[in-house]
């Protein structure tokens, strides 16, 4: 069956971001005196909005979570963003679907500027019609918001469900 629009998540779907995300989380937690030796303990941070994860996993207040996200980005923006690798076969999959006429869309909870930077760094950007992510100011954070934004940008009427 032919699909015109293909939506892809970034973290854990196109790339393995484990090292960059968990090291960035560890960096943020150290600000609060929390030490985590095994980075695998921090893998639940991959995917959901960061502030939510800091609040749910470490009982942080909104203000503390905001500080934690800022500390996370201090490490992530210059370094952690590139401690990442594309899964084998992804570039050829994206090239093939784009060549077949599909509209590839990246819909990620990661902030759009970071998602674009990762896509460009790994040579994936040309295969996407749109890269839609969360906003740095917190206006768009959930996957539902991101997909709704992507549908609007592509001028696709949302399904009833």
Image: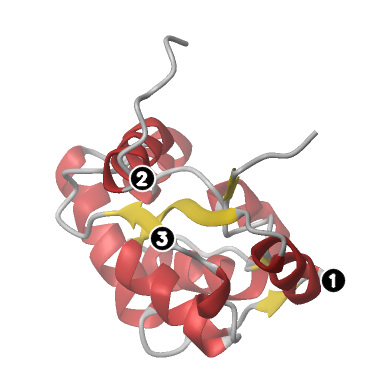
Residue 114 in picture, x, y percent from top left: 38, 72
Q: CA distance from mark 2 to mark 3?
A: 7 Å
Q: CA distance from mark 1 to mark 2?
A: 25 Å
Label 2 crowd bin: few (<14), some (14–19), many (20+), radius 10 Å: many
Q: Quadrant of residue 113?
A: bottom left
Q: Is 109 placed above or below 124 here?
A: above
Please report whichever mark, 1 or 2, sits nearer to the chain's N-terminal start.
1
Residue where numbered disc 2 is placed:
150
| Residue at figure coordinates x 57%, y 72% from the top left | 127
On the question of residue 120 being in view, the answer is yes
Q: Is 37 placed above or below 141 here?
A: below
Relative to 75, 36 lies left or right:
right
Residue 150 in picture, x, y percent from top left: 36, 45
**Element type at marker 1?**
loop
Q: Quadrant of residue 104?
A: bottom right
Relative to 118, 41 lies left or right:
right
| Tag 2 and tag 3, C-beta contact below 8 Å | yes
On the question of residue 31 being in view, the answer is no
| Residue at figure coordinates x 20%, y 53% from the top left | 66
Residue where numbered disc 1 is placed:
89
Residue where numbered disc 3 is placed:
130
Q: Nearer the viewer, residue 39 or 130?
A: 130
Please report whichever mark, 3 or 1, sits nearer to the chain's N-terminal start.
1
| Residue at figure coordinates x 38%, y 89% from the top left | 78
């Amino acid at each position: 069956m032919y699909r015109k629009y293909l939506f892809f998540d970034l973290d854990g779907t196109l790339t393995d971001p484990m090292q960059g995300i968990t090291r960035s989380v560890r960096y943020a937690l150290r600000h609060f005196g929390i030490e985590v030796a095994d980075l695998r303990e921090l893998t639940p941070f991959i995917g959901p909005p960061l502030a939510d994860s800091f609040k749910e996993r470490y009982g942080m207040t909104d203000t503390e979570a905001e500080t934690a996200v800022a500390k996370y980005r201090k490490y992530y923006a210059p370094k952690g963003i590139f401690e990442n690798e594309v899964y084998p076969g992804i570039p050829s999959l994206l090239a093939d679907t784009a060549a077949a006429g599909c509209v590839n869309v990246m819909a990620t909870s990661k902030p759009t500027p970071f998602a674009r930077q990762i896509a460009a760094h790994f040579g994936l950007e040309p295969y996407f019609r749109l890269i839609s992510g969360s906003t740095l100011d917190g206006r768009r954070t959930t996957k539902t918001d991101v997909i709704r934004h992507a549908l609007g940008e592509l001028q696709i009427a949302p399904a009833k469900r």
